[in-house]
Amino acid sequence: MLDLPLDELKGYLRIDGSEEDTTLALFVAAAEEYLLVAGVPEDQSGSARYKLAVMLYCAINYEHRDPAEKLEKFNFSLESLILQLKTG
């Protein structure tokens, strides 16, 4: 399990205050599940790339929360990190 303080994630997302803390914690948990299902081994969870992948996943989902918004393509940076994490 990743040790990602919400303050660090909020800094990355440029969020002030604590109104979004519950949502952000949910995004972090969902990101870790997403990476596991995508084939990223759990032993990668301590790497900087894993942490960045979680932060990117959170950023994408935070910035595109409108369910009516359609994403044409998932983020290339996140896809690249997942591939790197899967292959070691």
Image: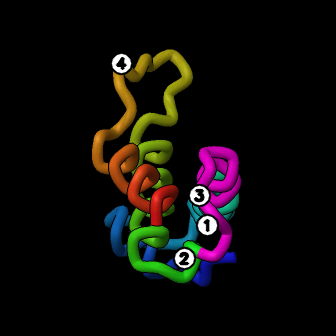
Give the CA separation, mark 1 to mark 4. Answer: 28 Å
Q: Amino acid at mark 3?
A: Val
Question: Which comes before the other along the chain, label 1 or label 2?
Answer: 2
Q: Which residue is mark 2?
A: 6
User: Picture coordinates of residue 47 (x, y %)?
Assistant: 47, 79
Packing grade of label 3 (10 A; few <14, some 14-19, many >=20) is: many
Which amino acid lies under the numbered mark 4 shown in the image of this protein? Answer: Glu
Question: Mark 1 is on which residue type?
Answer: Asp
Q: Which residue occupies 34% across, 39% down?
A: 75
Q: Nearer the viewer, residue 62 or 81?
A: 81
Mark 1 in CB contact with mark 2 (< 8 angstroms): yes
Q: Residue at x 44, y 19 (%)?
A: 69
Q: Secondary structure at mark 1?
A: helix
Q: Which residue is mark 1?
A: 21
In magenta, the rendered stretch is 32-43
Which color scheme is applied?
A: rainbow
Give the distance between the C-alpha atoms of the residues marked 4 and 3, in whole angstroms. Answer: 24 Å
Which residue position is annotated with label 4? 72
Mark 1 or 2: in front is 2
Q: Secondary structure at mark 3?
A: loop
